[in-house]
Image: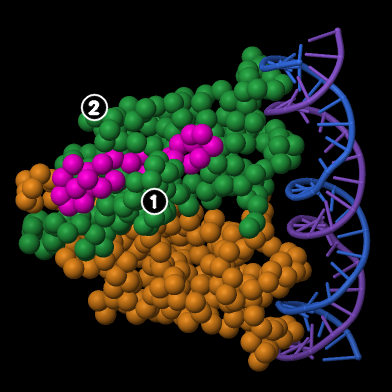
Chain colours: A green, B orange, C purple, D blue
Amino acid sequence: MPYDPSAFPPFAVTVDLVVLTVRRHALCALAVRRGEAPFQGRWALPGGFVRADEDLTQAAARELAEETGLHAHDPATPAHDNGAHLEQLATYGDPKRDPRMRVVSVAHLALAPDLPAPRAGGDASNARWAPVEELLQHGGYGRDGEPVAPLAFDHAQILADGVERARSKIEYSSLATAFCPTEFTVGELRRVYEAVWGVALDPRNFHRKVTGTPGFLVPTGGTTTRQGGRPAQLFRAGGATLLNPPMLRPEV
Amino acid sequence: MPYDPSAFPPFAVTVDLVVLTVRRHALCALAVRRGEAPFQGRWALPGGFVRADEDLTQAAARELAEETGLHAHDPATPAHDNGAHLEQLATYGDPKRDPRMRVVSVAHLALAPDLPAPRAGGDASNARWAPVEELLQHGGYGRDGEPVAPLAFDHAQILADGVERARSKIEYSSLATAFCPTEFTVGELRRVYEAVWGVALDPRNFHRKVTGTPGFLVPTGGTTTRQGGRPAQLFRAGGATLLNPPMLRPEV
DNA sequence: AGTGTTTATCGTCAGGAAGACGACTATGAT
DNA sequence: ATCATAGTCGTCTTCCTGACGATAAACACT
């Protein structure tokens, strides 16, 4: 039976990106300002159309590189090479999510260390890192006193889903190291957990947990650095990707 | 700026279903035989095109009802009403996954109790419950001596992802009850875990764990039934959806 | 030099949960 | 009556966690 184009309705397929990082003790997401209707001038998640010959992951990696300069490393890549972690998040396909046409968006979640400055088409004023609480609050006013408009489309929902994925996934995987540079201290890793979960963790118990889990952290031998206080050992992420038993997220 | 159809390539969007159940102590998935090319005559996961005015979840629920007669209950629905659990799994969009055209498939995972007999377009010979190991083994021979062909398209990968999702999700959620009828015993629930994980669990420790987790199981008062041996208390799924601490999957 | 501050790291202790199993109970089958 | 089968209750040991005391090694002052 030959291919019959009338047998199915055509869709546009996009990828949207939830790019998370930790800056100044807060979990932040990359937002870009929309230059055109609909939602012109509003903040949105970065994203774009999937090209005709492109895999979904390729499209997400391409958009990520275009927006941040980060190259995603394949989850298969063993060692932490300071590229961003990239994984598929979920797909959003409400018929009315884009008023122009039928668009199905395959959202991806990317986790990056703090380093990069955002750039959207070379124009820095149209891209920024914003604390996720700020992007998710509906109505009210941001830190700068400017009234906060909700994200465009269903991007608030996508962002919330991405944040929730990140929060739960660092419990039982070594994913939190994706927020850290190649070499990092136990304290830096702890501050990642604290920022992502929005809680305070006991430094001693945290240290015991992460250093006691085999394969999670490997000391780089080369040892100290500073962040104030006593020098700390430097580690890099070990081969272990699953954390068993998991790191427990405190209640309440 | 008006909508410009030439700005993006058109895609076909489908939903594919990983429908799992537990029968005769084995984790089984619903497979349908393809009636047309490509992969004519091969087994595949049930699925179909998303309609122009349909949400992705609606499309998955519709396909599920068409193939099994099961109606999915919304995850928001509180009580276990013997409908199937349905959730989005992942999206597959390799440019070459369908030789005819560019198809993006949003796979969904459904978990159902044992009861229903499969029916695909009214023809029972074109649909069956098959143990997932049998569907996933490449080459070799099935229980009936018939040579086993791999599933059509990338459905082996989708099935494997769905099985893995189910295996990990019953660890920390009450999802295993979706494999049980409305009322069930602790032993029946344990046999679900054993079938999904492919391990043996200690009946005493399992009983202590599930009855000791508040909100997980509620006794129906009406109490006994038989499955051989001493009568057991009947329970139904409680309101708790998260299992903390999780049920531990035995190693090795 | 001495003192205070900050962060890192090691240790101790009590409570909770899980694995291993023993023991007892209530059915149906022989 | 005896056995086989499942369900349910306890016990004991071990491991992990949370709470928290104590020490160590840097820097910023005075």
Which image quadrant for residue B184?
bottom right
Q: Please tell me whether the stretch drawn in magenta is mainly helix, strand or loop.
A: strand
Is residue A20 located in the magenta-colored stretch of the structure? yes
Q: Are marks 1 and 2 on the same chain?
A: yes
In the rendered structure, the residue with mark 2 lies on which chain? Answer: A
Mark 2 highlights which residue?
Answer: A122
Residue at the image point whose x is 37% and y is 78% from the top: B71
Q: Where residue A44 is drawn, which disc sits there? A: none
State the extent of the magenta-drawn residues as a range: A14-43
Residue at the image point whose x is 74% and y is 84% from the top: B230
User: As drawn, is B102 to the left or to the right of A184?
Assistant: left
Residue B99 seen from this side: no
Check disc 1: other Cα within 10 Å, few if <14, some if 14-19, many if 20+. few
Is residue A77 located in the magenta-colored stretch of the structure? no
Mark 1 highlights which residue?
Answer: A141
User: As drawn, is A109 to the left or to the right of A237?
Assistant: left
**Residue A202 or B84: which is nearer the viewer?**
A202
User: As drawn, is A153 to the left or to the right of A51?
Assistant: right
Q: Quadrant of the C terminus of chain A?
A: bottom right
Q: Amino acid at mark 1?
A: Tyr
